[in-house]
Amino acid sequence: MAPPSATADYAAPLAAPSAERITAKISRWIETYSGDRLIKGASVLTLVGLWYFGAFMLPSSVMPAPHVVVGVLWQEVTAGPIWRDVAITLTRIALAFSTAMSIAIVLGFAMGLSKRAEHFFDVWVVGGITVPSLVLILTIFMIIGLNEKAAIIAAALPVIPILTINIWEGIKGVDQKLIDMSRAFHARQSRIILSVIAPQIAPTLMASARFGLGLIWKMTLFVELLGRSDGVGYKIEFYYQMFNMSEVLAHALLFLFIMLFLEIVVLGKLEARLFRWRPTRRKL
Amino acid sequence: MSSVASIEINKVSKTFPGKSGQGGWKALDGATFTVKPGEFVCILGPSGCGKSTLLNILGGLDDQYEGVASILGRPVDEQIANGVRVAYVFQEPRLMPWRTVRSNIEFALQAAGFAAAEWPERIDRCLALVELSAFGDFYPLQLSGGMQQRASIARAFSIEPEVLLMDEPFSALDELTARRLRQQLLTIWSKFRSTVLFVTHNAFEATFLSDRILMMTKGPGGRFCDEIGLQALTRPRSYEDVRVFETSKAVVERLVGHVGSIDKD
């Protein structure tokens, strides 16, 4: 009889604290997140409320209520045709984004690392920022024609100078002391760029990527509206011509969800993983 | 060990150009000295005398100077290309905050061309020497200033440097931490016997650590004005040793003599 009772004695004190630990964990979790989540929930509810208020004040053909738009969206999503346009637009966004980002990275690095490149591209970049996107897009369509290639270049081009400036500034802010350290240990130039400079501008690159994605998606819709006959931008313009605001808002809403997903889930997770070495930020 | 001097500085001058090439600052004016292999030499001088400039020249960070700076008998830039191992400990730890302590040391080992298979053993050994064995996987920002500086000392020794350059490495720490680190530095140095060139403005530190003190005059135009041999102070040395204290007092007097005489000019 002695051995089994001994096991029971061991088991009991083990089980109790683990249950306690779980409750403690849950209450800690609620404590940490409830404040933030509550505010976020209130924020979304306020937005929806404002929308309802607008719908109440304006004719329903101008501003349909949220539930009407969601109903239309649900029909589109379940029926299927909207997905074709979403896929087309997302492809264009991906292509335009990767084009803009790669060119901006090359230009930004060149300008940040070489005085000559800085002096040479300075005027281009600053000039590029001041030219209205509309002018750039129309010019590209005029030169290349109303085709897919033109659409992607036109969506990417206005964003390139903005991203370049961001990355260029990020490289100028790189800690010279760490570069000196790596040179003192005789690290190769390629290793210094990869291991010392790149991690320091990673936060800038990350911010530029998020910022760039937001800009590119607006440019893509603009380009589709002006010069393509498919994609979400075209559909929005099509339904606008038909004066069907429910469809316009439904298309916009779906895209909002998709971009939010990309922004928060994909980029946000990536950011948290890349910068886990940073101590948690304290309140200011 | 060879009879070639570990470090040789011959009539080295350096002028930092002012705006539009006028009124530059002459940091060094014909500085000359040699350091023997395995010797621990301190350069002692007031702020702005060109101490750090000298280290930057020897570390290959600055190649705009006149005169000859050589390591193991060949010019600095040539030796860097030859892969002579020179390590540097700066006033601040200069660890990469996005890498763990271990990974920071790996960076130096890789740059020095050590095979990856050797890294873990070397890192473990050096972390043990600076009493950071438990902190290899910590990020620098999770450690105190003194621990970070110890990690940077571990990084320097991990490559078994032929020449170790130290630029006031303990001046930003509180005195008690600095004392412990000085003691640790001597213990590690006695195991590696690298040639050390240690720059400081602290006369006691220079006396406690070095075999020989080289004194510099105040800038502009830093030159070496005096030399004090400390072989009489047998190692291991301790803070309680009255001789160390008495000698450091004499060193301070000599320093004041030199710097003071320049003030009267």
Image (spheres, coloured by chain):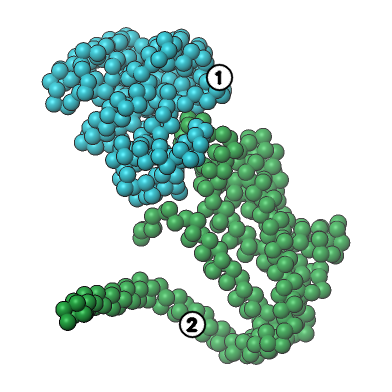
Chain colours: A green, B cyan
Left or right of residue A270: residue B181: left
The residue sitting at the front extreme is A1
Is residue B32 visible to the viewer in this orientation of the structure? no
- Cα distance, mark 2 to mark 1? 69 Å
Circle 1: element type = helix
| Chain letter, disc 1 residue | B
Q: Nearer the viewer, residue A125 or A1?
A: A1
User: In the rendered view, would you say B198 is above or below B100?
Assistant: above
Q: Quadrant of the C terminus of chain A?
A: bottom left
Q: Which residue is mark 1?
A: B78
Q: Measured from the top left, where is residue B97 in percent x and y?
A: 43, 46
User: In the rendered view, would you say B75 is above or below B146?
Assistant: above
Residue density around tag 2, few if under 14, some if 14–19, many if 20 or more, within 10 Å:
few
Q: Quadrant of the N terminus of chain A?
A: bottom left
Q: Nearer the viewer, residue B50 or A266?
A: A266
Circle 2: element type = helix
Name the residue type under label 2.
Answer: Leu
Name the residue type under label 1.
Answer: Glu
Q: Measured from the top left, where is residue A15 in percent x and y?
A: 26, 77
Q: Which residue is mark 2?
A: A45
